[in-house]
Image: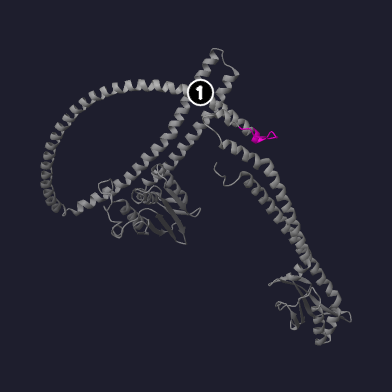
């Protein structure tokens, strides 16, 4: 039998005693703290009582400039057990006596009795010395009496030892009581149960039943009964297992017959496969012929490429025509961006509309069934209740999806109209950028990328909103297509601030960034890293022209491989 590493009773006893020990420690500490505070209060009261004892004689000594007598009084106070330091000052704050453990006092004279704690474990009581003469009072100085934590502990030392000893005796008695109870009620019965269970014989389960003397009807008694019932089930299972083994032997015989039949079928399939291999060899010969034809075609294409190089030399003289084509492509890129926006919104709107159509169809069918039951006079209260419940759920689903579609269309309509219009109007910049992000949400729906916008509230600027929409659309889509390529999760941060006459836009993503060569050509027309994959190279060029010409501002790009891309845009604030 394997030895138990950590006994259940020991572990349970350890937890119970640990809780008791912690509670005892907390209570004992609380009592010691109470004794400490009471002793400190008594000492503070005694220090205040000393004021009535010697303040009159000390006041007269200072009034009469009898410094030796004042020092003598201070030395006499030092003889008291509760006093560890004495400071006596005149009305100008000059020390007349400074004896024992003291601390430097503030230069201002003391005007009333005050108790203060000081560094180093000391505390003191300060009070003024008032001399009365001819009905007039005069402050002739002040006195500070010091005591310490050591004196407090000296007074409560016996009480602390009594509290600690009491806690230790009670803890020891409780440990003995628990050890005895756990051993009789848990440890010994568990050990006997474990011993009998370890002697279990699979071949003779009838003799392996548990016979432990447990007086109480507790969990161990239930465990013994359950184990004996399990032995009975095991005996029955062995009988059934013998029967199943006989059935399995018969099934194996039948399986051998099936294997023979399967081998015959495999032989037939092998012959068919050989024929297929011959056909593949024939197709291989045909493929070799096609490769030769393809090689000839490549030679012809090489000749055509040489001719195209000659034509490119002639096209170099057509710069004016190329410039016109460039302007047309810029406009096409702008409309393509709007087209992509339309496609994304259409797909996103289609989902809630589809759910709404389904809900309306379901509601129409339920109304038809209700009408039939009403016409046939079979309408019951249960049927009506079921219809009302389904109608409530269906209308709720229908309204939520139609509201979602309405929000998407509203956001898209504002951004789309602005992108096709050059008219200027007052724009809440923060709210408008959120509408732009909302209109681009379909492009991010299948990704884990996030966009964070930080813009002051009620920041209103006067400009053509289409310019703002085009700039931010190009920056966000550039991050999605280029910066977050092969990146499962990215973050875009847009920080907008304004001073008296300028708007500052700080746009950054944590994508793969740009190399120094690509960053230098970033705003060039027709420069793209996606040549042949749908990239036109006009997105950043359009951004540059819109910022510098339309908004009369400036734009800069900063990036490094693996460090993301940052745009810094500034343009005049017009209200």
Color scheme of the displayed model: one colour
**Rendering quarter of residue 135:** bottom right
The residue under label 1 is 239
Left or right: where 402 falls relative to 262: right
Q: Residue at x 86, y 74 (%)?
A: 52
Q: Please state the horizontal and vertical placement of residue 13, each as a whole percent of the image.
A: 66, 47
Residue 320 magenta-drawn? no
- The span picked out in magenta is 210-221
Residue 534 appears anywhere in the view: yes
Q: Is residue 219 magenta?
A: yes
| Residue drawn at 42 percent across, 45 percent down | 448
**Near-viewer residue (45 or 520):** 45
Q: Is residue 110 above or below residue 414?
A: below
In the rendered image, the residue lying farthest to the right is: 134
40 lies above or below 446: below
- Is the N terminus in the top left, top right, bottom left or bottom right quadrant? top right
Q: Is residue 170 left or right of residue 257?
A: right
Q: Position of residue 213 (x, y in %)?
A: 67, 34
Q: Return the x and y of residue 304 as percentages of the image width and height.
A: 12, 46
**Of the pair 533 and 244, the residue shown nearer to us:** 244
Q: Is residue 428 visible?
A: no
Closer to the camera, 243 or 506?
Answer: 243
Q: Secondary structure at mark 1?
A: helix
């Amino acid at each position: 039998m394997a030895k138990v590493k950590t006994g259940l009773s020991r572990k349970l006893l350890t937890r119970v005693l640990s809780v008791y020990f912690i509670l005892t420690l907390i209570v004992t500490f609380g009592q010691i703290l109470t004794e400490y505070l009471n002793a400190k209060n008594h000492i503070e009261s005694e220090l205040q009582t000393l004021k009535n004892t010697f303040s009159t004689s000390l006041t007269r000594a200072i009034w009469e400039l009898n410094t030796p007598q004042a020092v003598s009084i201070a030395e006499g106070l030092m003889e008291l057990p509760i006093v560890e330091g004495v400071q006596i000052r005149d009305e100008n704050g000059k020390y007349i006596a400074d004896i024992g453990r003291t601390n430097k006092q503030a230069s201002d004279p003391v005007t009333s009795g005050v108790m203060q704690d000081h560094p180093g474990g000391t505390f003191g009581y300060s009070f003024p010395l008032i001399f009365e003469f001819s009905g007039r009072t005069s402050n002739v100085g002040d006195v500070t009496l010091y005591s310490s934590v050591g004196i407090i502990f000296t007074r409560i030392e016996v009480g602390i030892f009594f509290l600690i000893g009491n806690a230790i005796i009670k803890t020891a008695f409780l440990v003995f009581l628990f050890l005895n109870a756990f051993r009789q009620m848990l440890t010994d019965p568990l050990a006997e149960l474990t011993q009998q269970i370890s002697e279990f014989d699979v071949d003779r389960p009838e003799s392996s039943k548990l016979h432990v003397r447990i007086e109480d009807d507790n969990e161990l008694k239930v465990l013994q009964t359950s184990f004996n019932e399990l032995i009975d089930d095991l005996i029955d299972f062995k009988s059934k297992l013998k029967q199943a083994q006989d059935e399995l032997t018969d099934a194996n015989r039948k399986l051998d017959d099936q294997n023979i039949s399967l081998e015959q079928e495999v032989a037939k399939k092998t012959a068919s496969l050989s024929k297929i291999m011959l056909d593949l060899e024939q197709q291989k010969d045909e493929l070799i012929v096609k490769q030769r034809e393809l090689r000839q075609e490549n030679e012809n294409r090489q000749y055509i490429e040489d001719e195209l190089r000659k034509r490119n030399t002639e096209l170099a003289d057509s710069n004016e025509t190329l410039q016109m084509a460039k302007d047309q492509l810029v406009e096409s890129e702008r409309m393509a961006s709007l087209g992509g926006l339309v496609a994304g919104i259409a797909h996103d709107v289609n989902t809630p509309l589809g759910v709404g159509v389904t809900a309306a169809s379901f509601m129409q069918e339920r109304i038809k069934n209700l009408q039939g039951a009403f016409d046939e006079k079979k309408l019951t209260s249960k049927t009506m209740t079921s219809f009302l419940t389904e109608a409530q759920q269906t209308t709720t689903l229908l309204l939520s999806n139609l509201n979602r579609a309405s929000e998407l269309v509203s956001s898209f309509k504002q951004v789309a109209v602005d992108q096709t219009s050059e008219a200027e109007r007052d724009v809440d910049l923060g709210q408008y950028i959120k509408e732009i992000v909302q209109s681009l949400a379909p492009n991010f729906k299948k990704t884990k990328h996030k966009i964070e916008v930080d813009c002051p509230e009620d920041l209103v600027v006067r400009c053509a909103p289409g310019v703002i929409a085009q700039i931010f659309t190009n920056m966000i889509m550039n991050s999605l297509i280029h910066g977050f390529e092969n990146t499962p999760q990215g973050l875009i941060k847009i920080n907008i601030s304004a001073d008296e006459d300028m708007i500052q836009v700080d746009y950054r993503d944590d994508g793969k960034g740009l190399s120094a060569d690509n960053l230098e050509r970033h705003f060039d027309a027709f420069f793209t890293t996606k040549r042949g994959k749908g990239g036109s190279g006009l997105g950043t060029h359009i951004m540059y022209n819109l910022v510098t010409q339309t908004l009369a501002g400036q734009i800069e790009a900063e990036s490094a491989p693996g460090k993301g891309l940052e745009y810094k845009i500034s343009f005049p604030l017009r209200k």
